[in-house]
Amino acid sequence: MLNTQHIRLLHVAGSLRLVYCSGPLLKAAQNAHIHDDSKTFVDLQMLKPEDEVLQAFNDMYDDNMTLFVNKYFKGPGTEFEKWTPSDWHENPDFLKKIKDPQLVEWAKELHGLWKELGRKIKKEVEKTPGQFSLVYVENPFIIPGGRFREFYYWDSYWVVKGLLLSEMYSTVRGMILNFVSMVKRYGFVPNGGRVYFEKRSQPPFLIPIVYEYLKASKDIQFVSDIMEHLVEEYNFWMTNRNVTITVDGANYTLNNYNVKMGMPRPESYREDVETANGLNKGGAAELFSNIASACESGWDFSSRWFNASNKLRSARTKNIIPVDLNSVLCKNEKILSDLFWEVGDVSKASMYRNAYTQRRIAIQAVLWNNDEGSWFDYDIETSSLNNQFFASNIAPWWANCYGNGYGNAEKEEKVLNYLQKTGVLSYPGGVPTSLVNTTQQWDFPNAWPPLQDMVIEALGSSLLTEARDTAERLAQNWTLTNWRAFRQSNAMYEKYDVRNQGDPGHGGEYEVQTGFGWTNGVVLTLLDRYGNILEADAKQPVSSAHTNKVVIETVYALLMAIAIIFIGII
């Protein structure tokens, strides 16, 4: 146990959070296996100030952690007050674009889910922040759902796309201000809204989020007011997550995920300890750092980050230069250039336009494989490309970060041929995340909404008719995947199984979650983009009421037919 003076020094210094992030109390509570999900404990509210709880733990005369936790903690989910978004209304204009009446009704249901997924933090969290793992932000926000009770960084890009279609501009503006407050506090946007996420981020989508908001709202003054914080978020990645490599005698600066955290993730404490079992202290610390870096990628977990054994224990995320991260940053550079042009700063617009150009050149030189006809992750340690399929491989196409930035039919044809050759376009339930089944959730057979949106948007923007037709077919398949699952279970899932339309995904550290923020946002995006051609599955009932109506009508028709026959006989 730690002595009282040591506890107080650490608490005052603010250098370590000894309940939610590390320390003997966290270790004891997680090892007691009080909750099936490790995340539950670190989401609980402390009923007393941190010093008192730590002192009580230090003075424990027995080892009954269940009684201790039940006495000094409550929750999860106590941090929020009831909130209904004031900018929600029943019939946003995008509904008019949808041809199929059944899909119109479904879109209305999904539009209504924003009210269920909305959260507003109690002032109590602001007044006594030491008793919560939740980071206080002023404005309400939309959560993913399920065990994900707080806002998440890259999830919010697809949530925002859906909210903007729902014309919830005030909610989006508030969410952006929340992210800006995080940048002011930490110098970057963390993975999510909990203190245990403070050491890692997620794919940097704040700038694209702001750009989507600007396109919908035309609120250039708001964007101008927060520009310095957008630049600060971008600079975090260029300062703390950058790597320079040499290819064919030329130097290129690109970015990777690199979290400096040599301890278990608090929200997955038991899992990480088990994964590192048997490693020496240095080896375990390095593994924890690579695991946290994989979480920073949003792909937790995937064979992308493993060695040939395809085991989580072999994670080496920091050695990988990811295609999608660099594509997102390329998109950021293009948007920053455009935004500075909009606000009249020609010098900075030119600077970021040059960064965008240099990024395109680097992606071409380092990540493109002309023989395969695709981009791939680059392995720093082996100085080679990982030529396996991942749905992220075509991210430069999605980000318009190839050729001269205005499309390139020759390259698009190569990439389309590559996708066809791998067979990933032929699955009924979506484009698989990878073709390797490791039982991890960011591998086969799972398909994830953000990746579907990126693939469909890339193909749909093509100069090639065949690519655009493929995008339409994929949009139809993904719509049916979500539609069928919703009609069967009345739930939207975070991921789906590509092998069967309507089957939820599986694998990884936790059960598949429902809600679900980015899933709803992607479906609404597709209904807006392709609503004139998308069709619901006529074999699937809209609701039980619809089913009863069909049964009644069928029985009535049969009785009428029998009556007609009977009258004819008479």
Image (cartoon, grey):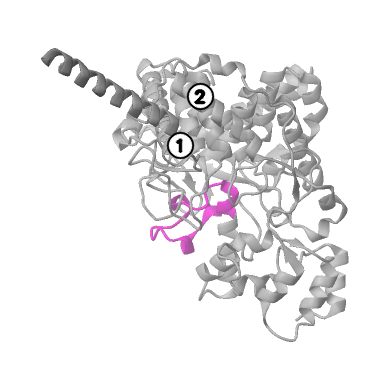
Q: Where residue 486 is drawn, which disc sits there?
A: 1
Q: Is residue 282 above or below residue 557?
A: below
SS class, disc 1: helix
The x and y percentages for residue 294 are 55, 52
The x and y percentages for residue 90 are 63, 22
Dot 1, crowdedness within 10 Å: few (<14), some or many (≥20)?
some
The x and y percentages for residue 75 are 70, 59
Question: Upstream in the sequence, badge 1 or badge 2?
Answer: 2
What's the amino acid at mark 1? Phe
What's the amino acid at mark 2? Glu
Report the residue at 52% width, 34% height from top.
363
* On-image quarter of the C terminus: top left
State left or right for residue 230 relative to residue 145. right
Q: Where residue 105 is drawn, which disc sits there?
A: 2
Q: Is residue 302 magenta?
A: yes
Question: Which residue is at the front of the view, 524 or 439?
Answer: 524
Question: Which residue is at the front of the view, 492 or 547?
Answer: 547
Q: Is residue 520 above or below residue 511?
A: above
* On-image quarter of the N terminus: bottom right
Q: Where residue 128 is drawn, which disc sits there?
A: none
For this orientation, the residue located farthest to the front is 570
